[in-house]
Image: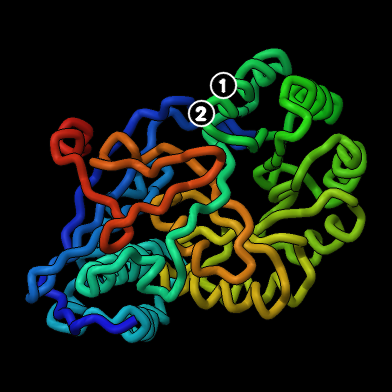
Amino acid sequence: MSAPPLTIRQLRSRAVRLPMRRPLVTSSGSIATVPLVLVDLETEEGVGGCSYLFCIHDGIVPLVRAALADLLALVRGAEAAPAALSQKAMARYRLIDPKSVIGLAISGLDTACWDALAKAANRPLARYLGATTKPVRAYNSCGLGMISPAAAADEVLGLLGEGFCAAKVRLGRAERKDDLAVVRSVRKAMPSDAILMSDYNQSLTVAEAIVRGRALDGEGLYWIEEPIRHDDYAGNARVAAALDTPVQIGENFVFPQAMAAALSAHACDYVMPDLQRIGGVTGWLRAAALADAAGVEMSSHLFPEVSAHLLAATPTAHWLEYVDWANSVLAEPLVIRDSMAIIPDRPGHGMRWDEASVRKYAID
């Protein structure tokens, strides 16, 4: 993983609000636009790196940008050595809880640093990490929200028609029979060899998760994701032990320590860390080592452009969650072919901004 040393000169951020091709409707509410903070790292050597952060709603954007500006004051002039920078940042912010937006800023810097280092080595990030750029198995997570059984059956055919053999349906309706009806309708509409994941978005109690999970056992679901509060590891362990269908959690792990605690509690069958919550590329690699040691399959949450490279370097790699949310500002969006994410053979993680689109969708 050798590359010439780089020195941090600048860390810039810009905010955009992007329209969603398919609004995401979950048990928690509806999301029709995506606020992103685009992060650009500049080095004294002229090699740059980039990343983006998902802010959920506009009110978080100025907080994330302020955190990035404060982080720059700490790291300007330092070597772009991701592990050392993360350690330095964690020490500085320990007393104000680095699990807040500060953690997002640390992840954004970390990912941009890895991008720059891989570019300096003239290798795709996956190869820079010692892996290959072989395609990564992906499922379509761009729809199937809280809609009717008939509408969900129609939509899943559209999702699979975009080059996928797998998709994910959102559950958590007021009545458990309605969740069952949607799953059956979608499953009936899909080819028999297609794969269907599900996501409750933390909407159930432990008791209700067990009741609904048992009702869904045998309905052909590949996994049940986040049935209860994400950080109730004891409760998740009870649910996982009671169901035949595997339980998936992990998008809300904040740094690898949270994942270690979940694995120790046997809280799930599968894990799916999120790039910006797990600590960027550095945090992901540490999480991947934990999953490997535990013999647990590891998927990704969002950020498919970078996550594809990281899954290629993950010993227990499972599924890439594909969303197209950032495509509007990407010069070359991630390509999906035959349900596989095609890792670009370009230095770094392969993302470049479409500057005209960035200006078009700018928030400020």
Q: Quadrant of residue 297?
A: bottom right
* Residue 226: x %, y % from top left: 69, 50
The answer to whether residue 276 is seen in the rendering is: no
Q: Is residue 16 left or right of residue 228?
A: left
Assess whether mark 1 and mark 2 are in contact (beta carbons under 8 angstroms).
yes
Q: Tell me what residue is drawn at x 41 percent, y 69 percent.
A: 281
* Residue 306: x %, y % from top left: 40, 57
Given residues 13 and 270, the one toward you in this image is 270
Tell me which amino acid carries mark 2.
Glu
Given residues 196 and 273, the one toward you in this image is 196
Q: Quadrant of the C terminus?
A: top left
- Which labelled disc corresponds to residue 158? 1
- Which labelled disc corresponds to residue 162? 2
Q: Is residue 21 left or right of residue 157?
A: left
Given residues 168 and 163, the one toward you in this image is 163
The answer to whether residue 148 is seen in the rendering is: yes
Q: Is residue 322 left or right of residue 104?
A: right
Q: Tell me what residue is drawn at x 69 percent, y 19 percent.
A: 153
Q: Tell me what residue is drawn at x 16 percent, y 64 percent.
A: 48
* Residue 55: x %, y % from top left: 38, 48
